Image (cartoon, grey):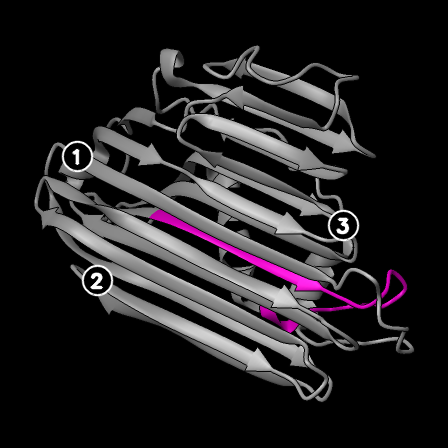
């Protein structure tokens, strides 16, 4: 599994630290720092059977300064559920942030779970201060050994935009955890992982089987190369735009040849299907009495700051730490 490239190494420090350190206030910019995200992903999970229960995991967090105000909400709600959670923070400086997480359950029976997970939010600094937003919406399905094989239809879609002193990131993994109750051994893996990051002025969207980008700095990766799905359904993407020019464009499998080549403009629109099918088979993993968990989720965060020399260690990133750690652990177990 390839290593994700991050344009801002300090993001992981921000997640771990969970606080902000701001430098001297700068003059009000001509274009206010602003970033926004919206992810809506439909899931249709049809294992051979064995669905026993499920939960909706949500995390929303916002932070704005100065002075600092923040909101954090996180919980797990039994499936089936249709609900929305919101956080909003507005500082006296005018900086403000909003985050929403929602789920809609269409079907939840032993052989079929379907619905939509969604997050959206923004961070806005119309004057001085800083703002950040983070949201996670994840459905976890729990069951027995019959869940070790089946079909997943996954419809990832996102839109994001930012100004010069702002950034936004979106992630979308599908992972599994199989427990052998006799030995206590957990076997984990990732069937699919999508990561998009926009740093500075620009926009990107993926919906209706079209990918459109107009960006100065953009990273887009897809890892759908698991040995637990057929070779005909696998594919990877490693795509980078730097200073408005495509500097990396590598793709394999079902995504091969769909993106602009190195040297192309960072502004384009191209056919790029977001209707994905994964016919997975985990074999005899976990033994005859295996307990299986599948996670279907999306997460995003946005940061806006007044000047490039401001060091923002955003507390909202803390809400996504669990997802990043889980992804790393699952990758090691695959």
Instruction: Report, in whole angstroms, how far the alpha carbon at label 2 lies from the one at label 1.
Output: 22 Å
Residue 153 found in image quarter: top left
Q: Residue at x 39, y 41 (%)?
A: 174
Residue 23 as seen in the image, left or right of residue 46: right
Residue 187 x %, y %: 37, 41
| Mark 2 crowd level (few <14, some 14–19, many ≥20, 10 Å Cα) | some
Residue 208 as seen in the image, left or right of residue 279: right
Instruction: Report, in whole angstroms, how far the alpha carbon at label 1 lies from the one at label 3.
Output: 38 Å
Q: Earlier in the sequence, mark 2 or mark 1?
A: 1
Q: Earlier in the sequence, mark 2 or mark 3?
A: 3
Which residues lie in the magenta part? 296-316
Q: Secondary structure at mark 3?
A: loop
- Closer mark to the observer between disc 1 and disc 3: 3
Instruction: Report, in whole angstroms, how far the alpha carbon at label 2 lies from the one at label 3.
Output: 35 Å
Above or below for 303 versus 154: below
Residue 182 as seen in the image, left or right of residue 88: left
Above or below for 74 versus 118: below
Residue 289 appears in the rendering: no
Residue 216 x %, y %: 77, 38
Q: Which residue is mark 1?
A: 47
- Closer mark to the observer between disc 2 and disc 1: 2
Above or below for 14 versus 92: above
Q: Which residue is mark 3?
A: 8
| Mark 3 crowd level (few <14, some 14–19, many ≥20, 10 Å Cα) | few
Residue 230 as seen in the image, left or right of residue 329: left
Q: Residue at x 31, y 26 (%)?
A: 278
Q: Which residue is mark 2?
A: 82
Residue 42 x %, y %: 30, 42
Q: Secondary structure at mark 1?
A: strand
Q: Earlier in the sequence, mark 1 or mark 3?
A: 3
Q: Nearer the viewer, residue 94 or 106?
A: 94
Residue 126 x %, y %: 72, 72
């Amino acid at each position: 599994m390839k290593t994700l490239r991050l344009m801002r190494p300090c993001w992981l420090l921000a997640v771990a630290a969970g606080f902000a350190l701001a430098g001297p206030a700068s003059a009000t910019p001509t274009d206010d720092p602003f970033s926004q995200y919206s992810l809506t992903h439909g899931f249709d999970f049809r294992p051979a059977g064995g669905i026993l229960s499920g939960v909706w995991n949500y995390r929303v967090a916002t932070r704005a300064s100065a002075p600092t105000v923040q909101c954090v909400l996180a919980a797990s709600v039994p499936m089936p559920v249709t609900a929305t959670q919101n956080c909003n923070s507005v500082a006296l400086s005018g900086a403000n942030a909003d985050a929403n997480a929602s789920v809609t359950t269409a079907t939840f029976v032993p052989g079929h779970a379907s619905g939509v997970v969604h997050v959206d939010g923004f961070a806005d600094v119309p004057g001085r201060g800083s703002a950040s937003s983070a949201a996670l919406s994840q459905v976890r399905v729990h069951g027995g050994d019959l869940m070790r094989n089946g079909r997943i239809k996954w419809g990832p879609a996102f839109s994001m935009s930012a100004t010069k002193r702002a950034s936004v990131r979106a992630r979308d993994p599908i992972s599994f955890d199989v427990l052998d109750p006799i030995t206590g051994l957990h076997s984990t893996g990732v069937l699919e992982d999508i990561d998009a990051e926009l740093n500075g002025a620009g926009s990107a969207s993926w919906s209706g089987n079209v990918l459109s980008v107009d960006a100065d700095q953009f990273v887009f990766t897809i890892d759908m190369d698991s040995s637990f799905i057929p070779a005909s359904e696998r594919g990877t993407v490693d795509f980078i735009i730097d200073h408005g020019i495509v500097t990396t464009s590598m793709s394999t499998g079902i995504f091969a040849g769909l993106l602009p080549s190195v040297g192309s403009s960072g502004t384009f629109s191209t056919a790029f299907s977001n209707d994905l099918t994964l016919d997975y088979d985990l074999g005899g993993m976990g033994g005859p009495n295996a307990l299986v968990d599948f996670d279907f989720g999306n997460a995003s965060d946005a940061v806006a700051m007044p000047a490039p020399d401001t060091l923002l260690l955003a507390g909202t990133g803390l809400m996504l730490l669990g997802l990043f750690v889980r992804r790393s652990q699952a990758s090691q177990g695959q």
